[in-house]
Image (cartoon, helix red, strand yellow):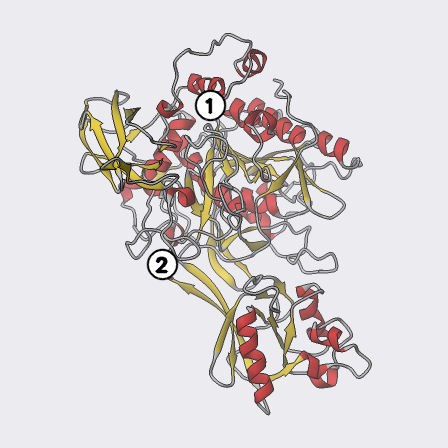
Amino acid sequence: MDFLLSWKKKKQRLLLSTRMWYQSSQAKPEDYTRLDHGPLWGSRGMEESQLVPYGPKPILVKTSSLPIWTLVCGPNQRALTMMEWVPFLQGGKALARVTPQALIATVECKYRRKLIGMRSFSKGFEAAVFPLNASQRVPRDTYGHGTHTLSTAGGAFVDNAEFYGYGKGTAKGGSPRARAASYKVCWLNKEGEADCRDEDILAGFDQAIADGVDVISVSLGPDLPIPDYFQEGTAIGSFHAVMHGIVVVCAAGNSGRRPGGTVANVAPWIITVAASTTDRSLDTFVQLGNHKQLHGVGQSSGRQMQHKYYPLINSLDAKLDTANATAAQLCFSGALDPEKVKGKVVACLRGNYPRVDKGKAVLEAGGVGMVLANDKEDGDQISPDIHYLPTTHISYTDGLALYSYTNATKSPVAYIVQRTSIGSKPAPVMAIFSSRGPNSLNPEILKPDITAPGVHILAAFSEAVPPSGLKDDERRVSFRLMNGTSMSCPHVAGVAGLLRKIYPDWSPAAIRSAIMTTARSRDNTMEPMMNASLAKATPFNHGAGHIRPNRAQDPGLVYDIPNVDYLNFLCYRGYNSSQMASFSKGGNYTCPENWSILDMNYPSIAVPNLRKPTTITRTLKNVGTPATYDVRVEHLAGVSATVEPKTLTFEKVGEEKSYKLTLSPKEYGRRNIMGGGEYVFGRIIWSDGTHYVRSPIVVSA
């Protein structure tokens, strides 16, 4: 099939992980797929009847980015193995077509049964950036991102997984016994950054469709401003995948610090995933001799301090006689006097020198720890780098307190503690980097759809790259802590794989609906979820809420979407007949005269510019037992909402019934009390007393 339509060529896309490394939850292996992922997913346990047996037919999860490092069968490949060999059924999705040339012949270890296919696509990159030689074109992970995301989606159970002592326990992916195929579409440019080209992204989608995968996890996306669907490879490729019944899950993006609607991958056929925290927190702090604790971030491969005070010295006071004062203050290599530094914690100032290299300079001079303090320009922006010795990176304000103590104390002392806490409250909280709505292309489609864990995530990592990302770092790890919507995306892909296993006949839209309508928008204090500023989060932050895999397997009702509605959506966007012919397999489709985007059967409702009464139609399909559902609408301040009918009775599986929701702006006298441009948020809930089918509502005046 040919997806190469009419976007501007040589467009670069981005991997959607930040260079921040934290910790994730663990789970124990069972003989069944446990949809509840332990602390990662929530505190509610599951009864035995809620366990899904593993069957012989594999679910195939495909990831697009920089895939698995497979040169050697190192410890990280434990995440990519099966606990026992389950043969493919006749007609199963063994990737015989993936193996020639692209499958790495050197993988002859027992772990190959998990990762059953690898391919690489580089023509777009080579045309736009620089050519690769044959040894560079192999689908190995030389960055770490692809290994991490694939093992998050489909990694097997691994005991004693950890990252320098953090997150120690049993790790697993969302679909721990899925088969996995990896498609490399991103390459390292001259700056050492991942570069993903639309041509290669489309080629990866094309091959994954031909290979018959069940779920595609895509932890990459466009930069801002978001391009039109027809100009963006992921949107085009995912459209064709969904037309073939494949679930496509994409990261929402890491532009949450920017103002306005920043969410990426907003096509209505995609499941778009934001990122939030878990109830596990990683805390690194310096304990001063005056009993003050200054909390920061940082991880270390070095030996940890044991709550024992060490002498604390300002790096400026530790400079070599021949060194420049600024170089010593910034802890440049060779600027510190070993006689003054040996056995001490050194306070260094951030700025104009790599942070990890500062710690290395302290270590080489004989120091036992480093406190890295921001200058005024950097303020509160701190980075949890992977250091060579115990280190905490603190804010400018805390740095003032640190230097005040060292300057006022004759013999200052300190020690550094790295600590993991479980049961943190409130949790989950939206990640500060997670991109937000509204949808900049079509505000009538609420994005993101869902949020999932994207902070403190432990997963397998490539042994081809050092944990710090620095070229001269000789350390290697099997697992790593990472942060980003790249990490939350494969969590949802893993759950989608489990749902595809349970309900093989469900459409991608039905699977998305089950995930969204069973999500939770409250935290573990039973209050509404909060954003990173600890203000109340909205559906623009989290979509339908935080994913609950155990509930998603039994949604009661789903909002299904026929494929023709995605074509109707493209008509609504104004695509011409030749473009529509490319999307509709040869031109057998004609745009309808009357079709409303508000009536697309999406599991959320968004109405921009509500100036007059507006009626929205939705259709629910019963996927559970016979039941009668009643409706209620909550929290829509300034908006009158009526639903007809108010009760829906379903007598059999597959039965569909529709309802109409009419929204009207309330008026006080002649004034619309919503106010111009204001957003209000609410939800509509259908319940039979056991199932609660929740859909967020967003309305603007």
The amino acid marked with disc number 2 is Pro
Q: Is residue 312 left or right of residue 191?
A: left
- Residue 687, quarter of the rendered image: top left
Which of 82/651 is in front?
Answer: 651
Residue at the limit of the structure toward the top, as seen here? 588
Residue at image position (46%, 23%) is 245
Q: Amino acid at mark 1?
A: Gly
Q: Which residue is mark 1?
A: 245
The image quarter in which residue 197 lies:
top right
Q: Is residue 391 above or below residue 531?
A: below
Judging from the image, what secondary structure is the residue with disc 2 in? Answer: loop
The C terminus lies in which quarter of the figure? Answer: top left
Q: Tell me where residue 583 appears, x and y as whole percent.
A: 54, 17
Any mark on residue 426, and which? Answer: 2
193 vs 556, left or right, is right
Residue 246 x/y as whole percent: 48, 26
Residue ID at (56%, 9%): 586
Left or right, 498 with respect to 632, comes to right
Q: Residue furthest front?
A: 670
- Please tell me whether residue 297 is drawn above or below residue 16 in the rendered image: below
